[in-house]
Amino acid sequence: MMPEPLSYIVAFVSVGLIIWVLAARKASGMVWTLAVAVGLGVWTAFTHSSGFTIAFAWIAFLVASLSLNVNFLRRKLMSDWVLRLFRKRMPPMSQTEREAIEAGTVWWDAKLFSGRPNWNKLLAIPKPTLTAEEQAFLDGPVEEVCQMIDDWQINEELHDLPEKVWQFMRDKGFFGMIIPKKYGGLEFSALAHSAVVMKVASRSMTSAVTVMVPNSIGPAELLYHYGTEEQKNYYLPRLARGEEVPCFGLTGPDAGSDAASMTDNGVVCRGEFGGKKDVLGIRLNWEKRYITLGPVATVLALAFKLYDPDHLLGNKEELGITVALIPTNTPGISIGRRHFPLNVSFQNGPNSGRNVFIPIDWIIGGVDRSGQGWKMLMECLAAGRSISLPALSTGAGKLVSRTVGAYARIRKQFKMSIGHFEGVEEALSRIGGYAYLMEAARVMTAGAVDLGEKPSVISAIVKYHLTEHMRRLVNDAMDVLGGRGICLGPRNFMGNVYQSLPIGITVEGANILTRSLIIFGQGAIRCHPYILKEMRAVSDPDPVRSSMRFDRALFEHAKFFISNVARSLFMGLTGGRLVSVPSDSSASHYFRQLTRMSTAFAVASDMAMLVLGGALKRKEHISGRLADVLSHLYLASASLKRFKDDGSPQDDLPFLQWACEYSLHNIQERLDEIIQNFPSRPVAWLLRLLIFPTGKHYKVPSDEIGRQVAGVLMEPSEARDRLTAGIYTAVGKDEPMEIMEMALKKIVEAEAIEKRLHKAIQSRMLKPANQESLLQEAVKVGVIDEKEADLVKAAEMARREAIRVDDFPQDYWVRN
């Protein structure tokens, strides 16, 4: 018979394990009640405790069971008290904040927020593909326009696209990619839209920005979704044909990300217009800046605050942010001047209006849409931000991978390719890893949009992280290129890309605010399974319905939290080894670890919201780090899906390993920083126990993986072609990319011959000499033949051509 102390230990451990399993399995209240009742029954049968103790235990059990399982009692005793506390602690939310938060849809981001990502479901989504028509457009008009573009001429000489390029883009429908065919547009998918921008961006950032703006958030999208039939029928065909050049005016001196601070205003009144008197309209005054295509725009979508002091439209005086579509030749408008955004010469400039009178029906969507402008913009931005800037950034990433990888093999120092120096190799590994990850996120996100999603949180993730990763890999590229990168001229394929970096960082939501406020701030409300339900319950004006809705959400939330706490600790102790994941042996480890970190993220998020409440809105250090965790969960997910969609090619495995290990290490470090800086130290200690019970084990990608990634960039191969697919590969003797590609091929072909020459020198068969003399002697003694000597000469000529930089006469800048 077991000794009594040991039996107590066994019983205690058994009860603990049962509780742990029930918590992890998110057991219902009735299952918990039954389990406790069974446990009490066993305890009653075998305990030596007094009758009073047993009776007390059962009475306590019955009271707790009734309180938790009888909805009416639970609300009165618990949830209503929490509801009152919630109302006090919930931060005030402006209408613009509310509309921004509720814009768009949630998708895979919600699964990651739940702590239970269903990998099989993600992998089962078909790989996004282009239609034959879309591919033909990329192979035809996009290829042609890239051939027409001379980026040096655009930025140095014309400071604009040549008129023939503008006209070609108009004629071929570049400005109408998102417009339906019935209005004369191309009606392309989000993936095709993204692919066009990416390819043009690999040729010219200025041209890419020019293409992307009419197809991003702006008049066409707003008209299609919200315009009246009359507005659609008039403007959409003209926009599709390029007869109208659109711009969108939102940012002003006092309002950028904070649209609520906008001072641009319109007052509903009656006035004279088009020879008619007593026309119901709006008297506008505004000042905008940073408006892309503004200097050449023929039609302006203007955002402003609308007021109706004379109640001509209804009872409200302050109607809210409204968007109207205004021809730029309307009297009172000042437009046409330009900003100079670094040396990237896309059309961008300020505009303003003083006492501009427009008819009321120029509001997009008509009078019924007055005051709904911010909601309209947020709903469009939820999808639009997913496409243009991520595509532009990915195009740059692929361009860098192909050209700088080649240059690292071509350029020699100390008689060896600089790409074989470990410092350069490290930079190349980041370039290749980032490029793989960026393309994965671009395609997966565009595919989600084509499935009907408007992924507002994911759009913020890819906008922020792809533009930031573009900045990092281009900086690495400039380090590798050295003087070849900083001397501007027609041969420099990286200088203007480098100068364009801050543009992507700044537009469509400044990156600092996107990270610290939007990704987690919006994600915590939209993606969390219960937070939005609780907020809506709190806002419900009916007290009975509010109580019932809040009670249901609160106790489901409690079960969700307890389950994730139990699962996080279990996966931390087991290293995630027992997690069920898709049966891909090459990637199964990453599926397990991302599941573990998804659960850890759910626990950290709930704990932060529970402890900090409304103050979390101002704790941008914490919210920014939580945003990074969610973002890297998404980026690694996209990398896994890309690898599977591509058929799991083993040559691409180093890229997958680099991307996943990079993201897992980032997730670990951000969670650790949250724990180190969490305001409540006892909660921080608890979080460390739940998330890292055995310590931190994720490492940065190993040197060996980095070496393999860098190696792919420096040698022609199918893996290198897959990594850089979709960019413009310029052909022509004066094209920098063609010069690099030809030099790379010749140098790779000549390397084996050069090694033989080097060995012959070491064995003293040959004496060191200049190349011409060395090759002549090598042929003479039979080390190589004439054909091989010619190959070495050709490789050296190609290398010299590839590393050559532009130079100009002294008076060049005076003349230009």
Image (cartoon, grey):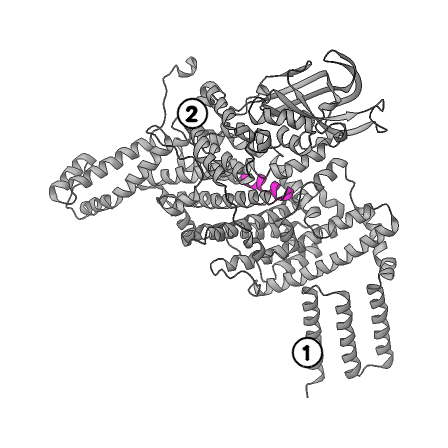
One can see residue 612 in this view: no
The residue to which callout 1 is attached is: 10
Residue range (magenta): 451-466
Q: Does residue 152 belong to the magenta stretch?
A: no
Evaluate if marks 2 and 1 touch, with contact meaning CB atoms under 8 Å apart.
Answer: no
The residue to which callout 2 is attached is: 150
Q: Please give the label number shown on residue 589.
A: none
Point out the tag, 2 or 1, that comes first from the N-terminus: 1
Seen in the image, is 311 located left or right of residue 371?
A: right
Is the residue marked by circle 1 packed among few (<14), some (14-19), or many (20+) residues within 10 Å?
few
Residue at the far front: name it: 182
One can see residue 358 in this view: yes
Q: Does residue 462 belong to the magenta stretch?
A: yes
Residue at the far bottom: name it: 1
Q: Nearer the viewer, mark 2 or mark 1?
A: 2
The vertical placement of 251 against 465, above or below, is above
Q: Give how far across and how far down residue 614 sits, in percent.
A: 76, 45
What amino acid is labelled 1 in the image? Val
Q: Give how far across and how far down residue 297 sits, in percent.
A: 59, 21
Report, in whole angstroms, how far the alpha carbon at label 2 lies from the one at label 1.
78 Å
Looking at the image, which is closer to me, 691 or 292? Answer: 292
